[in-house]
Image (cartoon, grey):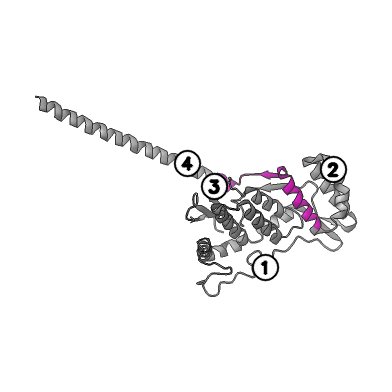
Amino acid sequence: HCRSKATLTVEHKGSNGPSTIMFLPRPSASALAFLAVAPFLLATSVQAADGDGGGGGMPDGMPDGMDFSNMPGFGDKPCPNFRCTSGYSPVQKTRAKFVSKGCSKMGGGMMMMGAGSGNERYAPCCDNWHACYQTCGASKKSCDEGFKSCSEQMCAGDDDCKKSADINSMMLNMGGCQLYDQGQYGSCECAKSSKVEEKRSAAIRSFYKKFAPDNIDKADALAKKADSVGKMAALFRKLTAKYPDSIRIEMDDEMKMYEKMMKDAKMDKETNDGKEQEEQEEEEAADDSDATTVNMDDEF
């Protein structure tokens, strides 16, 4: 088991600051694969940003034999949806909780941080992405594509924003199925086929009761319309997007550690700069004192 951390810093020309990708303890298999291909993917990203190509697929120069396309969550191979045994169907848990840890935590075993972490223009897209993973029946692909579409709209006309969002997109493509699986197992429960509509209605009613009580009477009718796992997932994605307060924002423990490190580093720099300034002032004062002594000797 690997307990150490590694970081990779990516800086775009004209950006407000570098972005740091931190590989956290015990990364997923696809995160380890990312370590091998990161330099090639980053080179392609930079070329595309500078208008030098980057038309998709693996870049030229990829070492022979590196093919991770069959790894679930990596490349085109989808993560499997939550499933129940025969006679049961997946339904959203009645007291569903949607939690977002922000744009920095969008890769399995990886965390991206930079000068604007926590204040990204497309931060709501990241929150909706986390909520989507925690929506029973939503496919990983639909969640990832939803983030890309959302961030493109939010970043319209802002190149730095687009570059940062592109890094996030790359991270979620490399994240594997770990976060998605965690979200699905935390949000889904299996209900008997005869109880599915009742369970769906209860989940919708519970959501409205907490975040839109005036609409609670709509629950039964909506449950009848959302008569499949996919339709129910689409309904909850719309609800979390319409009522953003339903998504609780939490700072990840690793993010807290990173911010503390950055704060301590800034304080150390300010302390060192202050000491250097004091030493410089003392040297200048000593030079002035020597000059005054010479002038007094001249008077005698």
Pick the front one: 289 or 242 = 242
The residue beneath circle 4 is 264
What SS does tag 2 mark? helix
Q: Which residues are magenta?
A: 231-258
Q: CA distance from mark 4 to mark 2?
A: 49 Å
Closer to us: mark 3 or mark 4?
A: 3
Badge nearest the viewer, 1 or 3: 3
Q: Is residue 102 magenta?
A: no
Mark closest to the chain's N terminus, 2 or 1: 1
The residue carrying pointer 4 sits among few (fewer than 14), some (14 to 19) or many (20 or more) residues within 10 Å by Cα, namely: few
| Local SS, label 1 | loop
Answer few, some or many: residues within 10 Å of disc 2's Cα (few below 14, many 20 plus, some between 14 and 19): some
Find the distance from the CA under tag 2 to the CA under tag 1.
39 Å
Question: What is the three-letter code of the residue carrying label 2?
Answer: Ile
Residue 26 shows up from this direction: no
Q: Position of residue 114 (x, y in %)?
A: 52, 50
Amino acid type for the residue under numbered disc 3 = Gly
Viewer-side label of 2, 1: 2
Local crowd at mark 1 within 10 Å, few (<14), some, or many (≥20)?
some
Q: Which residue is mark 2?
A: 216
Q: Tag 1: residue type?
A: Lys
Q: Which mark is drawn over residue 77?
A: 1
Give the Cα separation between the discs numbered 1 and 4. 42 Å
Name the residue carrying label 3.
116
Q: Is residue 252 magenta?
A: yes
